[in-house]
Image: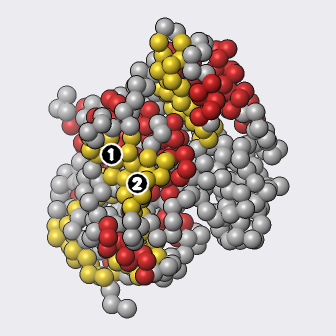
Amino acid sequence: MAGIAVSTTINGDQAEFLCHPDETLLEVLRERLGLMGVKEGCGTGDCGACSIILDDRLVCSCLVLGAEAEGRRIATVEGMAQGDKLHPLQQKFLEHAALQCGICTPGFLIAAKDLLAKNPDPTEEEIRFGLAGNLCRCTGYDKIVRAVQDAASVMRGA
Amino acid sequence: MKRFTYTRAETVADAVAILADRPQAQFLAGGTNLVDLMKYDVERPDAIIDINSLPLKEIEELPDGGLRIGALASNSAVAYNAQIQARFPLLASAILAGASPQLRNAATTGGNLLQRTRCSYFYDPSTPCNKREPGSGCAAIGGLTRMHAILGASDKCIAVHPSDMCVALAALDATVEVVGPDSARDIAFGDFHRLPGDEPQRDNTLARDELVTGIRLEANRFAGHHTYLKLRDRLSYAFALVSVAAAMEIADGRIVDLRIALGGVAHRPWRDPLVEAEYAGAPAEDVTFQRVADRLLFEAKGLGGNDFKILLARKAIVRALRQAASGRPQSQTLKAIQ
């Protein structure tokens, strides 16, 4: 069977790939395009480790087919830093030690980026509600919440 | 996953025509329940028809004061829509009580109606399940029943419908718009989902060759007195043990119009319009609420592991009606039960 030809934009760059119908976007991003920041945790939409922003919507890439990416814009954790300069969320996750094993971290960063784009000054409750689709099994959530609060304050220029 | 072909439909007519040609095909919208079930080998379509390009995303006002929600409007788009929040806050609240941001962003209105039960035996192809494989038996009966039905179950299936959104739509008397190869029709929300009976493989009354295209909501006077109260094993991102969508219109301390639907207790959102009608005119106070609860739960039966749900449901109904009557709906972000 011929592959499906898909043309998309990833972190601002044009990208084209061929995939099978049954390949998820998560598989395409990791295995065909080498974007290893997108992690597979559960593969069924429960853990959020594979979170990406697809046309301005935070989604789990494990539940999207690669073929569905045609004509769409994708943002992954790889697009957050500018060269050597970390995104404020990345910097604050480091400073607050808001990670341990790190497999959930790219998903949290992308989810937090999406949250702050929609709500630059969230309350703690709103951060917890906004990050409810991302699971961390090492660190617990308090440090993550503090890191997001701190990054939000930096990003508001406060 | 079983191998399948992928086709993108560009129009509703196109989508329905492709489905008619492929008896094992399935429509793909948000994918948040279909793709995971395909990974579990529970759904095994040989063809996927991607309907995400269809023009069914709009939320539009109707001339009679109602709203029409396109079947492809995402759960987030509905929950954060200004018209929905102002005029149908019960619906917004129910949606925000469920799933996670990622899933609400992807999941669609039509797909939410069609999501399958989260019965863990249904999800496990190594166990018998009459819903997954008709005639194979039910491993849940005699198994772990904490999440299972207390109302309307059969000896073939005790699964519950998992949706929060649909519980609100049941209370709001929504209408489901569907299109088939030759005609379009409306299905009253109360007629859409079914009880398991002898055919638990059929979750609803949608015909095999039909596509859900939208939901209509009639104007109502419930915006001041409503709540969606969801009780679950943890406060976030879990399916309901019991949930209650309650709405009422109150004048001079008396109920003018009452709506109440339950989630997590049956194979479909559970509602009894006759009970609601009986309490029109009753004082909006605890004694009335307790009577409503007793009436709705009169035939409730536990299966051992879910016996607690009967008392939980009774208390949840009373609490939800109290929240609705007082005009203080349950917050879905600040999760303390009010």
Q: Is residue A86 visible?
A: yes
Along the viewing direction, whichever of B107 and B179 lies nearer the viewer: B179
Whether the residues at callouts 2 and 1 have beta carbons within 8 Å, the answer is: yes
Rendered position, B53 above or below B284: below
**Residue B17 location in percent, x, y?**
37, 76
Q: The residue tagged with tag 2: helix, strand or loop?
A: strand
User: How far across and down, in percent of the image, does residue A68 sit?
Assistant: 32, 69
Q: Amino acid at mark 1?
A: Arg
Q: Residue at x 68, y 27 (%)?
A: B293
Q: Residue at 26% across / 44% down in the picture?
A: B60
Q: Is residue B58 left or right of residue B313?
A: left
In-front residue for pair B205/A99: B205
| Both marks 2 and 1 on one chain | yes
Q: Residue at x 76, y 38 (%)?
A: B300
Count of numbered circles on the image: 2
* Quarter the N terminus of chain A occupies: bottom left
- The quarter of the rendered structure image containing the C terminus of chain A is top left
Which residue is disc 2 drawn over? B177
* Residue topped by disc 1: B68
Determine whether, in the image, residue B17 is placed left or right of residue B319. Answer: left
